[in-house]
Amino acid sequence: MNIKNRYVRAVTLEAKGLLSLKDYPYPELKKNCAIIKMEYSGICGTDKHSFQGYFEQKGGRPIPLPVIQGHENVGVIEEINGELLDHDGRKLSVGDRVVPLQIFLAVSAMHAEITDLIIIVNVNWTTATI
């Protein structure tokens, strides 16, 4: 399929209590980045509060709408441009299941139960979600 005709979908918060499934342009894969197909996404307190209509984060920073919520993710690498390494220095490959670094502490606490996850340390998240 031609990349120009590809798109990605995401559940998007458009207003208080209003979620919709929207299409977005397929991201450009930049050097030393990966595109990850999300399998799971956790909902944090900020996501819950913005859904309820509270559009300011702690410190007064506004949450712009529309917004794609969910930053606690598990996904599979779809594409890689360059060489990416996990937290142990192992080379990442297409098809690897990965977890973003921001939830590293939560995952490391469950390490004995989770054996097939790899932690990403070098991904540009502006281009990494499908």
Image (cartoon, rainbow, N blue to C red):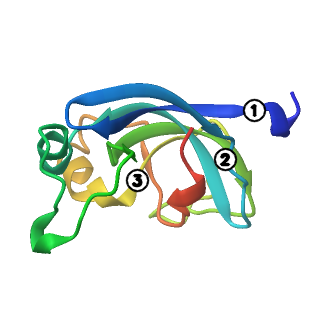
Categorize mark 2 by other alpha carbons within 10 Å: few (<14), some (14-19), many (20+). some
Could you say where residue 22 lies in the image, as x and y percent from the top left?
Answer: 51, 30
Q: Is residue 12 above or below residue 128?
A: above
Q: Which dot, 3 or 1, sits closer to the camera?
A: 1
Q: Which dot, 2 or 3, sits closer to the camera?
A: 3
Q: Quadrant of residue 53?
A: top left
Q: Tell me how far mark 2 sits from mark 3, CA to CA.
A: 15 Å
56 or 104, which is in the foreground? Answer: 56
Q: Amino acid at mark 3?
A: Pro
What residue lies at 40% left-to-right and 53% top-to-bottom?
100
Q: Secondary structure under badge 2?
A: loop
Q: Amino acid at mark 1?
A: Arg
Q: Which residue is mark 3?
A: 100
Categorize mark 1 by other alpha carbons within 10 Å: few (<14), some (14-19), many (20+). few
Q: Which numbered disc, 1 or 2, marks the residue that appears first in the sequence?
A: 1
- The reply to whether discs 2 and 3 touch (Cβ–Cβ < 8 Å) is no
Q: How many marks?
A: 3
- The reply to whether discs 1 and 2 touch (Cβ–Cβ < 8 Å) is no
Q: Which residue is mark 2?
A: 93
* Viewport quadrant of the N terminus: top right
Q: Which numbered disc, 3 or 1, marks the residue that appears first in the sequence?
A: 1
Q: Which numbered disc, 2 or 3, marks the residue that appears first in the sequence?
A: 2
Could you say where residue 113 lies in the image, as x and y percent from the top left?
Answer: 24, 34
| Label of residue 6 in the image | 1
Q: Is residue 30 left or right of residue 124?
A: right
Q: Secondary structure under badge 1?
A: loop
What residue lies at 54% left-to-right and 44% top-to-bottom?
129
What residue lies at 57% left-to-right and 51% top-to-bottom?
128
Q: Tell me how far mark 1 sits from mark 2, CA to CA.
A: 22 Å
